[in-house]
């Protein structure tokens, strides 16, 4: 199943994060999405097979938009990644045991 990464930018730390994912999970297909509209369209497609979405440096308006998509996100594990001063902070939100074992 593909892993979706949402980010409006591709800063240095985001590129480093992507390399780490590709190294640790070489067989996982990674799909990049750069807008909430594109994310919504992808999730609304039948059989999208998205199990995990990584949200990088989301702003308040983007989180509000995600709340509107709550019914679509029922079986999807969300991972919010926030860039601290010299480290990354990860928050895991999951409503389905199937995806977050």
Image (cartoon, helix red, strand yellow):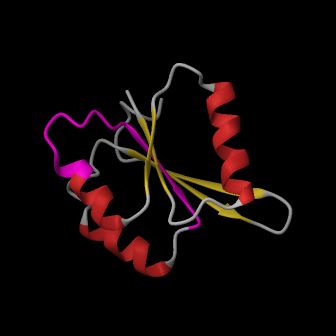
Q: Residue at point 36% right, 76% down? A: 64
Q: Is residue 43 left or right of residue 95?
A: left
Indicate whether residue 50 is drawn in magenta. Answer: yes
Q: Extreme right residue here?
A: 86
Q: For the N terminus, which image quadrant? A: top left
Q: Residue at point 29% right, 41% down? A: 75
* Quarter location, residue 77: top left
Give percent across and percent down for residue 69.
Answer: 25, 62
Whether residue 69 is situated above or below residue 27 in the rendered picture: below
Q: Extreme top residue here?
A: 27
Q: Residue at point 16% right, 45% down? A: 45
Whether residue 66 is situated above or below residue 60 in the rendered picture: above
Indicate whether residue 82 is drawn in magenta. Answer: no
Q: Is residue 55 left or right of residue 95?
A: right
Pick the residue in front: 26 or 89.
26
Pick the residue in front: 54 or 11.
11
**Total of numbered circles in the picture?**
0
Whether residue 47 is situated above or below residue 38 in the rendered picture: above
Q: Residue at point 47% right, 80% down? A: 60
Whether residue 48 is situated above or below residue 60 in the rendered picture: above
Give percent across and percent down for residue 95.
Answer: 36, 47
Find the magenta span and give its range.
42-57
Pick the residue in front: 88 or 10.
10
């Amino acid at each position: 199943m593909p892993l979706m990464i949402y980010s409006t930018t591709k800063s240095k730390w985001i590129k480093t994060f992507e390399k780490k994912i590709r190294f640790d999970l070489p067989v996982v297909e990674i799909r990049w999405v750069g807008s909430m509209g594109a994310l919504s369209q992808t999730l609304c497609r039948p059989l999208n097979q998205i199990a995990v979405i990584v949200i990088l440096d989301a702003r308040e308006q983007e989180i509000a938009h995600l709340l509107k998509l709550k019914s679509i996100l029922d079986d999807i594990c969300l991972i919010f990644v926030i860039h601290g001063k010299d480290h990354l902070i990860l928050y895991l939100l999951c409503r389905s045991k199937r995806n977050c074992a």
